Amino acid sequence: MQSDKLSGDVEANPDRVDLFYQQGKVACVMFTVLLLLSFLVIGIVTGLNFKNNSQENQTRGLLSDDITPIPFQYKGNKGLCSDGWVLYKNTCYLIVNVYGTWELSKSLCHDHGAHLMVVNSEEELEFISRVVQKSPDYWIGLKRDKMGQWSWVNGDNYHSTPHFWDENKPPHWDTESCIYLKGSDTVHRKLMHDADCHSERYHICEQKLEKGTW
């Protein structure tokens, strides 16, 4: 009987049914719009947070001396260096944070078509000191043979290049030794030290760009 009464109400009040239908339809549309707006707001907030975090990470990479470099932002827009290398003027550098002897480091650079770093200016040394880690030592391409003669791996004359020795370095005796940039948590610019060539340190490779590409 209750069912018959409901049917009678529906037949007697068709406008009432349409009203309920329209209200339900409007409520459904409003719910859908609110749901879409919620997803849109969440997407915008997430995107802004990601962008801000990326910018903070890039800034931290530029300003902090405590993180290992190989920061791609030093490559600039030209992309003249291979991935993992950093660009300064007309030279690409590879910072290798793997321990090895001087000879092994020299060989690894050669495998990359490069050679151990040759320090040509104070500005170059300042740049490298900024992009490497502060604490570790890094082999460079300078060696003294058993006769006490100095030579750079690329053939540059030792006496015609600037020298950036630390205080009381190098010692003045005729013994074979290899040169590295000394790590320090207190000194901003790394300076040159000598050590047994069989000791193990990180190293820096460099590769000159061909003229016409810069």
Image: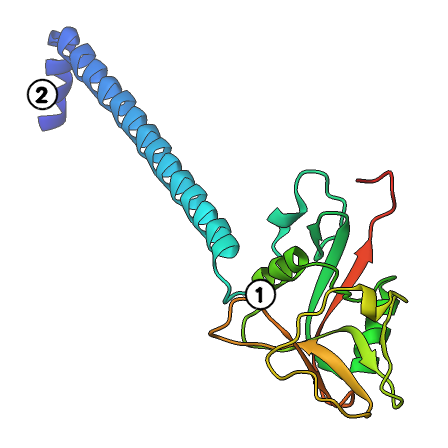
Q: Name the amino acid type tagged 1.
A: Thr
Q: Which quarter shows the N terminus?
A: top left
Residue 145, compared with residue 140, is above or below; it is below
Q: Name the amino acid type tagged 2.
A: Lys
> Can residue 214 be seen from the camera position used here?
yes
| Local secondary structure at mark 1 | loop
Residue corresponding to mark 2: 5
Classed neighbour count for the residue bearing mark 2: other residues with Cα under 10 Å, few (<14), some (14–19), many (≥20): few
Residue 197 in which image quadrant: bottom right
Residue drawn at point x = 74 percent, y = 89 percent: 172
> Can residue 82 be seen from the camera position used here?
no
Q: Position of residue 123 (x, y in %)?
A: 64, 55
Q: Which mark is residue 119?
A: none
| Residue closer to the observer: 89 or 45 | 89
Left or right: 2 as drawn, with respect to 86: left
Q: Mark 1 touching mark 2, by CB under 8 A?
A: no
Q: Which quarter shows the C terminus?
A: top right
Q: How many marks?
A: 2
- How far apart marks 1 and 2 lie (CA) works out to 81 Å
Q: Earlier in the sequence, mark 1 or mark 2?
A: 2
Residue drawn at point x = 84 percent, y = 63 percent: 112
Residue corresponding to mark 1: 68
| Local secondary structure at mark 2 | helix
